[in-house]
Image: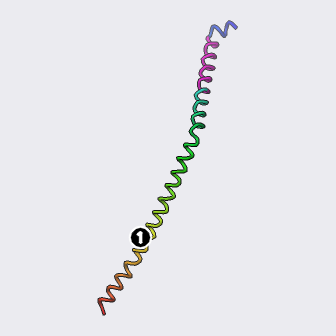
């Protein structure tokens, strides 16, 4: 045992154990905070999902409207040319 005390292994072992205990405490604290706020995170993700779906719907409607307008332009031009040529 005297060799262990001479080379400082006991002190080092105690330091390592203390550091591991501190890390475990920090990990447990983090887990606790995440668990406490889990409902908030789920709610926020749900709101984001809803907002994304609303934006997707708006963009689909706008794209359909733009496509309809773009398709109507040649028809209107052809109709105007036909009416003028009469």
User: Is 70 situated above or below 41?
Assistant: below
- Across and down, in percent, residue 49 comes to 53, 53
Who's the residue at 30% across and 91% down the image? 85
Quarter of the figure with residue 79: bottom left
- Across and down, in percent, residue 24 comes to 62, 27
Q: Tell me where the magenta segment starts and ends, as one range.
A: 8-24
**Residue 53 colored magenta?**
no
Quarter of the figure with residue 34: top right
Query: Hey, which residue is sitting farthest bottom in the picture?
Result: 86
**Residue 21 colored magenta?**
yes
Question: For this view, does 74 lie left or right of residue 42?
Answer: left
Q: Secondary structure at mark 1?
A: helix
- Across and down, in percent, residue 22 comes to 59, 23
41, 22: nearer the viewer: 41
User: Which residue is identified by label 1?
Assistant: 66
- Across and down, in percent, residue 13 comes to 64, 17
Who's the residue at 65% across and 8% down the image? 5
* Magenta highlight: main SS: helix
Who's the residue at 57% across and 32% down the image? 30
Quadrant for the C terminus in the image: bottom left
User: Is 46 situated above or below 12?
Assistant: below
Quadrant for the N terminus in the image: top right
**Circle 1: is it few (<14), some (14-19), or many (20+) Cα within 10 Å?**
few
């Amino acid at each position: 045992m005297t060799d262990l005390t001479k080379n400082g292994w006991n002190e080092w072992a105690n330091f390592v154990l203390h550091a591991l205990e501190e890390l475990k405490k920090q990990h447990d604290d983090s887990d606790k905070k995440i668990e406490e706020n889990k409902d908030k995170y789920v709610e926020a993700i749900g709101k984001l999902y809803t907002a994304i779906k609303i934006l997707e719907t708006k963009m689909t409607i706008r794209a359909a409207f733009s496509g309809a307008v773009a398709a109507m332009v040649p028809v209107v031009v052809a109709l105007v040319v036909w009416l003028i040529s009469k």
